[in-house]
Structures are given as structure tokens and as C-alpha cells.
Amino acid sequence: MFLSRLALVISLGLAALPASAHEYWLEAPVYQVQPGAELTTNIKNGQLFEGTNLAYFANRTDRFDLSFEGGTLPVQGRMGDSPALQITAPPRDGLLIVAHEASPSSLTYKDWETFVGFTKHKDFKTALAEHLAAGYPQDKVRERYTRHSKALIAIGDGRGSDRELGLATEFTALTNPYDADFDGMMTVALTYQGAPRPDVQIEVYEKSAEIKPIVTVYRSDDQGHLTFPVSPGMTYLVDSVVLRPAPDAGQTDKSPHWESLWASLTFAVPN
């Protein structure tokens, strides 16, 4: 199941990435809280695991919910909440799954080179040829994008399992980093429309209060799984992107040419 990582470990350097290649994730100030304690989580947007906090707005959110002990409830947020999630933790030990899907947004690339850079950075090998074959323009390339984020938060001992929640594209943890017998090897499954995504690029970001973020680039195996080493005291963001032709491309002169769907999963590894 384990695949060797690509020979690419990138230190923090925002200028190295295209301006459009912004990650989007859920980040908890603390990933382990006691039952009944205050629990908050931010919606973040940025690059290389550093970014700004986004407030909660219902009109920018398609889904925001909590899963615990097999049940799922929607987040009852207030407009403008920041942190976006502000709750009292469940009264029992277990693994809390926070899920968020942002409403679709759109962008227009400022030039062809920026779009080319995005396709290369995210390893979309056929996108440029498909774009030209479809007769799409090389200026004003338009894209619609959606974000599909999960976070794993330990309540007490954090025992339990992640599960698929039906996000359009989704990471599901097959190991629990909060388990007492966790061996330091994390395994995740990546899906798109419920099916595995084999042989695609997955980026794993890690950081701590003392260590600047770094990213390692891997590929999923033939089951859409990835196993990778993690370290105590570190926080992780796992990220992958689907790029597909927009179903409404060409319908109007403002229709997008492409759609991107971004999947992310965040968690921490206890000391």
C-alpha cells in the first residue's frame, strides 16, 4: 500500500506557487480537547499551510456538520462567526469529524502562463491538450472551484474511526493518529464521487509551533490509498485536487471552462 514519495520536499516559499493555487482547510487551535470543553475550528485559506481565517457565512457554505459516534448533525453557526466553529465538545470520549463544503466560487486566470503553472503544479498532465482541443481561449481562462474539507479532532482519548461522509471528493482516514497504539504510519483513502482516485498527486503538509510548514508530494496507490510517516507533535494537512471540464462550458461567454474540486483533511499527532 505504501508508495515512495516523489523527490520533492518544498520549504516554505509562497512565490514558488501560482497565485491561484490556494489551499483551503479546517484548522483547530487544539486538536485534543476534554469532553464538555470549549472547541473551536477555523476555516483557513492560504498557501503551504499558512493562511487567513475565514468567517462563517451561510451563503458561502453548502455543508457544515459534525459526525460523532456514527451520527451527523449540522453546525448551527451564526453569520460572521470567527472561528467558524464554536461549540461545546461532546460529553464522551471519541473521534469528532468536522466536515465543510464551500459554495462554488469562480476565477479568471490573468494569463495563460498562470493557468499552465497551475496545471503543472497540481499534475494535470492532459489538461492543456484538452483545453486547446476544445477550442478554449488562452486568455481569460475561467474556472469554477469548490472546497471539501474535513478535520479529525480527539475528544478525550479520541478513540474511533473516520468514515466517508459523501463529500464530492474526500479524504477518509483509515488509521487514527489519536489511538494509543498508533504506529506513526498514517493511511488515508481518497475518493471522487464515491470512487477511489488511484495514481494521483497528494500533497502532505506538516508544521508545528516551532517548525515552519513543509510539503511532501506523494501519489496514491491503485486503491486510491496513501500511507505516509507522521511525527509526534506535528499537525498535518492532506490535500488533493480534481480538475474536470465544466459541464456548462460554452453555454455563455461567461461560462467556466474548468471546474476544480479540492479535498483536504487535517489532524494532529499527539506527543
Image: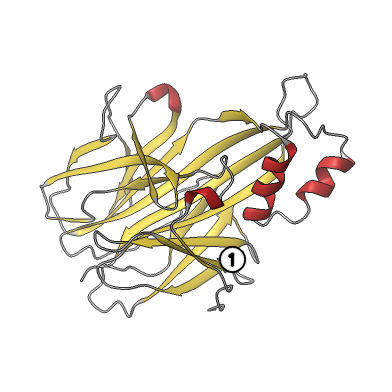
Colour scheme in use: secondary structure
Q: Which residue is mark 1?
A: 224
Residue 18: x and y, percent? Answer: 59, 45
Question: Element type at marker 1?
Answer: loop
Decide which of 70, 42 is in the foreground and name it: 42
Residue at x-position 81% and y-position 41%? 131
Residue 4 falls left or right of residue 98:
right
Q: Residue at x 33, y 59 (%)?
A: 267
Split into 4 quadrants, where in the image is the N terminus? bottom right
Density class for disc 1 (Cα within 10 Å; few <14, some 14-19, many ≥20) is many
Residue at left offset 22%, top offset 75%: 180
The picture places residue 40, in percent across and down from the top left corner, at 22, 42
Q: Is residue 209 visible?
A: yes
- The image quadrant of residue 106 is top right
Rendering coords of residue 50 (x, y %): 38, 48
Q: How many marks?
A: 1
Q: Is residue 194 visible?
A: no
Q: Image height check: is 50 above or below 62?
A: below
| Residue 50 left/right relative to 156 | right
* Left or right for 218, reference 153: right
Judge by depth and name the residue closer to the eye, 128 or 259: 128
Which residue is found at the position 30% from the left and 63% from the top? Answer: 211
| Residue 271 pos. (x, y %) | 20, 71
Mark 1 residue type: Gly
